[in-house]
């Protein structure tokens, strides 16, 4: 092949993502160079090709070593798990420093899993998130999955308990089998339904059995999936539960610094010049992250619908007050 044809063939192979063809043309180029007496260049080209090929094989092996057989879970499992691939990041969250530190540590250990395992150490992967509504527990599960590029499986505890009375333990076992098979973040939301609701109409003995089974499975589990459980009420939970987790992370409503950051993050591009951030932060006192975020979004929506995209502090305060009233009412 003439040099110009080789170049075109290389480009076509590259554009068509045909790496076999790409390397074979590249090898021809090297051979031609050798024939022209450019032995050094030919040797360098050959070395580059070999290296690129072997890297590709290694990364191919790594990729194929862990198939992610992911679609929506099927059959019985489909009733218990929902899956999504989150795109959230921790940097989008406004968190108290101790929470931030703990979550960063989880990420760091997960990302260093291979090195840790080389020393017989295992990365943290069992978290219990405790805190009032709207403080970011669910968002944390999403952000950890997003950061680690793992699927997020949410375990529907309610359906586990209510629909499958008498066989909850069997179903729970199914979930733990899945967790071994497909690496992911498994989020046991509204975990309370297992630990609590003693006075509810559900069979208390059944709940106890399921909770015990959960603890047992949690103990036995040696998968590389992350298990995240979340609850609103810590005090009623069994102490036995706490011991099984690598970390128990407590979420609180935002302090004034956090509230300010949250408002800034939401509205930075849309604030009026005389936006009274201090006044909004004051009005936000006692509200959860979720409520503050919603008030900001609602104020922005109003502004957009009114034909401009500048939000006044009064508008945000009005939405916060409306929320406070409906909470009281
Ligand atoms: N710490 C936070 N930083 C930034 N945004 C937050 C934070 N917490 C909550 N939000 C906002 O509020 C929404 C709802 O929060 P989330 O669902 O994570 O709360 P939660 O703690 O799981 O509440 P619940 O106990 O009711 O399940 C999030 O999607 C996000 O928009
Ligand atoms: Mg939640």
Image (tube, helix red, strand yellow):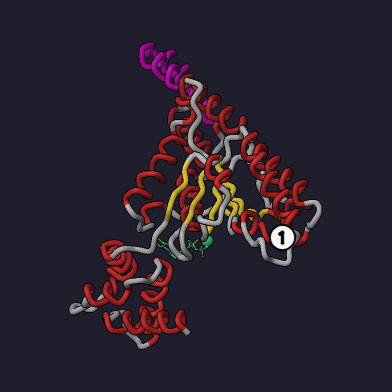
Return the residue nearer the eye: 156 or 253.
253
Return the residue nearer the eye: 219 or 117.
219
Q: Residues within 10 Å of mark 1 (few under 14, many from 20)?
A: some
Q: List x then y, in percent, for residue 152.
A: 57, 50
Indicate whether residue 173 is drawn in magenta.
no
Ligand 1 positioned in quadrant? bottom left
Q: List x then y, in percent, for residue 57.
A: 55, 25
- Principal secondary structure, stretch drawn in magenta: helix
Q: Secondary structure at mark 1?
A: helix
Return the residue nearer the eye: 154 or 288.
288
Return the residue nearer the eye: 31 or 3.
31
Q: Is residue 218 shown left or right of residue 138?
A: right
Q: Residue at x 60, y 52 (%)?
A: 188
Q: Is residue 250 shown left or right of residue 276?
A: right
Q: Residue furthest bottom?
A: 306
Q: Residue furthest left?
A: 274
Q: Is residue 97 shown left or right of residue 121?
A: left
Looking at mark 1, is its residue's CB closer than 8 Å to ligand 2?
A: no
Q: Residue at x 35, y 45 (%)?
A: 101
Q: List x then y, in percent, for residue 253.
A: 38, 64
Q: List x then y, in percent, for residue 83.
A: 62, 53
When the figure is inspected, residue 48 is found, relative to residue 189, above or below; the finding is: above
Indicate whether residue 37 is drawn in magenta.
yes
- Magenta highlight range: 20-48
When the figure is inspected, residue 316 is found, relative to residue 213, above or below; the finding is: below
Q: Residue at x 45, y 19 (%)?
A: 30
Q: Which residue is mark 1?
A: 159
Q: Is residue 259 shown left or right of residue 59?
A: left
């Amino acid at each position: 092949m003439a040099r110009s044809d080789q170049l075109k063939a290389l480009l076509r192979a590259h554009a068509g993502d045909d790496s076999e063809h790409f390397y074979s043309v590249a090898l021809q180029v090297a051979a031609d160079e050798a024939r022209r007496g450019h032995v050094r260049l030919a040797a360098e080209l050959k070395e580059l090709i070999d290296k690129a090929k072997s890297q590709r094989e290694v990364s191919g092996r790594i990729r194929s070593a862990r198939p992610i057989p992911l679609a929506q879970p099927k059959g019985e499992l489909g009733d218990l798990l929902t899956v999504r691939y989150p795109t959230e990041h921790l940097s989008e969250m406004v968190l108290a420093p101790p929470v931030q530190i703990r979550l960063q540590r989880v990420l760091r250990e997960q990302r260093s899993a291979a090195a840790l395992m080389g020393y017989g150490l295992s990365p943290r992967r069992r978290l219990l998130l405790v805190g009032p509504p709207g403080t970011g527990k669910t968002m944390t599960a999403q952000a950890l999955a997003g950061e680690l590029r793992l699927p997020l499986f949410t375990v529907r505890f309610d359906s586990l308990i209510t629909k499958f009375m008498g066989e909850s333990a069997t179903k729970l076992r199914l979930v733990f089998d899945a967790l071994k098979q497909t690496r992911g973040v498994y989020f046991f939301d509204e975990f309370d339904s297992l630990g609590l609701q003693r006075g509810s109409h559900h069979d208390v003995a059944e709940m106890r059995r399921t909770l015990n089974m959960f603890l047992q499975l949690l103990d036995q589990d040696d998968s590389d999936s992350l298990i995240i459980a979340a609850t609103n009420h810590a005090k009623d939970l069994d102490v036995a539960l706490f011991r099984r987790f690598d970390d128990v992370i407590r979420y609180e409503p935002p302090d004034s610094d956090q509230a300010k950051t949250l408002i800034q993050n939401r509205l930075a591009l849309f604030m009026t010049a005389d936006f009274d951030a201090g006044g909004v932060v004051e009005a936000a006192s006692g509200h959860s992250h979720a409520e503050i975020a919603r008030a900001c979004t609602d104020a922005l929506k109003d502004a957009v619908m009114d034909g401009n995209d500048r939000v006044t502090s009064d508008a945000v305060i009005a939405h916060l007050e409306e929320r406070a009233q409906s909470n009281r009412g």
